[in-house]
Every structure is written in C-alpha cells, then in structure tokens.
C-alpha cells in the first residue's frame, strides 16, 4: 500500500497539466488534479482558441469587400459583438466539458480548488482546507498577463483576459505591446471596425522573429489602417467621467481611446503557491527552474509549461507534460527538443515560421544562402487588395541544409506545421528543389526558388 494519497498530484488544469495527468493515469498511476478556475487553461479558456475565433470573425470585413472582385454583390451588413462573444462562450464551455470528461474517463480525480504546495510531498486544497499527499507533484499553473504597476492610471487598462469579455466594442482602442498577442489583437479590433493604434516600446514589432518578416507584418498592418507606433510608451493614463481614456506617451503624444489594452508579456503564475517554502528554486522573474526532464530543485516536484518560461506555447506544454508522464510513470524516458518549434502568429496577414531566423543562423555559420520571394496572392489578382505574401528560406551554404523557413500570407500557420516535419528530418535545399510543385498554389514558391537573393559569406 502506498504511503501517499496519490502517485501524482497536478496543480493546474491547463493543456500541459491535463496531458500529464491523463498519460500518467494510463500508465497505472493514481492521479489527482486541482484547478481553481476552468479546465483547459489559458489556451482554451482565454487564449489561443477564443483568439483565433475572433480572428476568423474579424476577417469577414475584408472577405465581403473582396467578394465584389469575383462577381458577388454583397448587401447591407452589420456586426454584433454580443453575438460573437456569446458564440465564443458557448464553444469554450463545450471544450471545457471535453477536458473534464477526458480526465474523468482516465480515472483522474478532479478537485475544483486552488491548491498550494505545503512541502515536497504535500498539497493543501484551499476550497476545503484538506491536505493531500503525493509521491510526485507537477506544477502546471501557467502564466498571467503583465501590467505596469508603476504606471499612473494603469488601473484603467485591460489585458487579453478582459478583452474576451468586454460588454461592447469601443470606437477606438490602443493596444500596447509588440509581441504576437498585441499584434493579433490589433488585427482583430481593426477588422471589427475599431480605430486601432499599436504602441510598442521597441524599434520593431515581433521581437525574436526574422527581421524581414517583422518589417513585412508592420507594413501590411499599416496598409489595413492600423497605426503602428514604435519606440514609445505610456507615461500616464487618465479616465474622464464618460469613461474615455487619455494616455500620455514618453515622446509627447496624446492618445484617446475607449479602451487601452496591455499585451506586454506574461509572468509565471507562481506567487503564493508555497514553492519557496517547499524549497523549489525560482529565477529572477518567478519562473520555476527545471532540468531537461522538467524536474525542479526538489526531486519530487516537477514543472511544465509557461510556468517554467522555456518556450511558452501550448503544444510545447503538452509535449513537456507527456514526456514527464512517460519518463516518471511509463518507464519510457524521453525529453522535449526545444530547438525546433514551428509556430504561427495569427496576424493579418498570418505568419508561420520554423527554424532559425537569419539573425540566429548567422550566429551559427557565416555562410548563408537566402531565398526570398514576395508576390501578390492569386486571390488578390481579382479582389484588387494591396496585400503581399513573403516567403523566405535560410540555407547553410556549406551543407545545403535548410535552417529556417518563414512565411507571411494566407494559411502560413498550416504550412509551418508541415514544414516543421521537413526541417526536423534535416531537409536540404536540394530536397526542396526536387519536390514537384503543386500548381496553382502559393506554397509552390517554396520549391521553385532556384537562385539565392542573397549570398552571405563570412
């Protein structure tokens, strides 16, 4: 008989925690899980899933316009924010139900409570005051949106959490930040008819992505009517009696809006979790320090997902949770490779990327062949829309290995997923060249670019 109530207790019911709990249970472990809000985590409840539903909604304004170029006459149209939010909420409720049922079918015991760590093998459930024990504890509590606590008037802003539940759309909005969340929401609001400004402190949006792609996204956003302001930040925000917000910036601008949304990064959700008392080491931003097997400084406590601040993406958290469960409970040890992660930014137009940026590749080898192609998507030859696609291949000139692929345009995220397979297999430019093109598609450019646009040599 075990000395513990559970073999594994998971704190956090997001994608990583749920995957770990289910896989561990299939390996025969007795598993408990605690979630204080709703199962599904940030991605399902207030992140990527509802966000992409909003992206779909926002694209219809252009679809109606583009239809005329193909012979359609589109009549009077209107948009209801209330209907969109209601439909989104119904879908999120459906998905949370699936998460719950899948856990229950795997014989995982669910605790609808906030849980805190009491020691290396003990957890307290705040809803009941009950203390339970576990041989292993997994922390999978994710991260929370940052706000500038020192900004005068900062209490008036919203984050992505609140953006999904606004009672109505403002006429004007300022989105602060330059990462994928800020860029995506700027596109959403603009597409839904809101006068949108994106305010970012850095020199160019989407830091960490390939510079050519960053510049191209910026340009396309401005074509769509979004005002993009780089190199500036708010210094104060005031709210008048009518609810109108006025923000002053470091560079002397005055921006008025019905809402100001901050998307300036996320912080690991580790405060008041009892980790320090249990001896779990945190880094300077509060992320849990782990090794390549997701083990913390306390041997019985592991952590996966955004709370570790390794690669803050839902599919990565899922892989980390799965690897943990297989390693600890399934006698099938493996680790997650964080070096090659396909990803997408659901900007408008969309960006998909896998592998190294040009800047990262140059740090590894001075000899690169760069292939770039920019063109109007076939759809817009009749719609007349001034929107360009950009495709970029980064190739090691010494080995012919494709180091990175970056795409801006329709369905770029779908393409990045497939391209991730090819790069994981070590594809060369010759492999791309001998692949027959699918015509007429935009993706055929990936296998028809024959001559480098740039040859970089150290």
Image: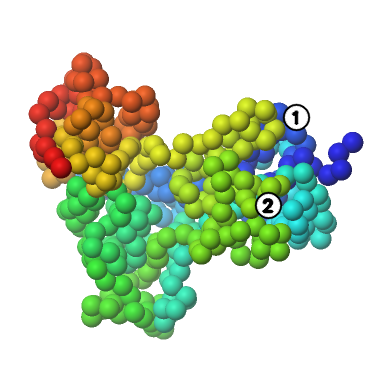
Q: Position of residue 306 (x, y in %)?
A: 52, 51
Residue nearest the viewer, comparing 270 with 162: 270
The residue nearer to you, when weighing 455 against 74, is: 455
Query: What residue sits 28% from the left and 36% below the top?
Result: 404
- Whichever of callouts 1 and 2 sits on the residue coming sooner in the sequence is 1
Q: Quadrant of residue 262?
A: bottom left
From where the camera sits, is residue 158 visible? yes
Q: Which label lies toward us, 1 or 2?
A: 2
Label 2 secondary element? loop
The CA span between labels 1 and 2 is 24 Å
Q: Residue at 28% of width from left, 77% of height from top? A: 249
Give coordinates of residue 457: x percent, y percent: 13, 40
* Residue 217 seen in render: no
Image quadrant in which the C terminus is located: top left
Q: Residue at x 77, y 40 (%)?
A: 7
Residue drawn where x is 47% and y is 75% of the image = 149
Q: Say the numbered circle drawn on residue 28.
A: 1
Residues tagged 1 and 2 counted as in contact (Cβ below 8 A) = no
Residue located beneath label 2 in the image: 298
Where residue 380 appears, as percent x and y from the top left, is 15, 37
């Amino acid at each position: 008989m075990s000395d513990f109530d559970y073999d594994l207790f998971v704190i956090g019911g997001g994608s990583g925690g749920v995957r770990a709990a289910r896989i561990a249970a299939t390996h025969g472990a007795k598993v408990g899980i605690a979630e204080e809000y709703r199962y599904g985590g940030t991605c399902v409840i207030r992140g990527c899933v509802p966000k992409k539903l909003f992206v779909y909604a926002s694209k219809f304004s252009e679809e109606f316009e583009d239809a005329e170029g193909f012979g359609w006459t589109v009549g009077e149209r209107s948009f209801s924010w209330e209907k969109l939010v209601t439909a989104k909420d119904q879908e999120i409720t459906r998905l949370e139900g699936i998460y719950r049922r899948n856990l229950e079918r795997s014989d995982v015991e669910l605790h609808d409570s906030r849980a805190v760590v009491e020691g290396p093998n003990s957890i307290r459930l705040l809803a009941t005051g009950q203390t339970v024990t576990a041989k292993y504890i997994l922390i999978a509590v994710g991260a929370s949106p940052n706000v500038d606590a020192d900004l005068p008037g900062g209490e008036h802003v919203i984050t992505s959490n609140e953006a999904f539940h606004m009672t109505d759309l403002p006429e004007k909005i300022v989105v602060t930040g330059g990462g994928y969340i800020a860029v995506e929401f700027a596109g959403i609001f603009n597409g839904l008819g809101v006068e949108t400004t994106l305010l970012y402190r850095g020199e160019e949006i989407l830091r960490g992505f390939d510079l050519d792609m960053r510049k191209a996204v910026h340009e396309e956003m401005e074509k769509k009517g979004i005002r993009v302001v780089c190199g500036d930040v708010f210094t104060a925000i005031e709210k008048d009696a009518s609810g109108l917000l006025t923000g002053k910036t470091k560079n002397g601008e005055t921006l008025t809006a019905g809402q100001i949304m901050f998307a300036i990064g996320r912080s690991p959700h580790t405060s008041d979790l009892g980790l320090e008392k249990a001896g779990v080491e945190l880094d300077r931003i509060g992320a849990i320090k782990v090794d390549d097997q997701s083990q913390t400084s306390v041997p019985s406590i592991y952590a996966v997902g955004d709370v570790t601040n390794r690669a803050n993406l839902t599919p990565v958290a899922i892989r980390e949770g799965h690897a943990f469960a297989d390693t600890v409970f399934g006698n099938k040890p493996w680790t997650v490779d964080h070096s090659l992660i396909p990803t997408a930014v659901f900007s408008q137009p969309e960006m998909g990327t896998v592998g190294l940026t040009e800047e990262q590749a140059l740090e590894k080898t001075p000899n690169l062949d760069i292939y770039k192609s920019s063109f109007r998507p076939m759809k817009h030859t009749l719609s007349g829309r001034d929107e360009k696609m950009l495709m970029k291949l980064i190739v090691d000139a010494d080995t012919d290995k494709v180091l990175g692929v970056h795409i801006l345009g329709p369905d770029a995220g779908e393409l990045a997923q497939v391209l991730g397979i090819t790069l994981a297999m070590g594809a060369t430019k010759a492999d791309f060249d001998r692949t027959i093109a699918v015509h007429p598609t935009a993706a055929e450019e990936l296998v028809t670019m024959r001559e480098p646009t740039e040859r970089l040599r150290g």
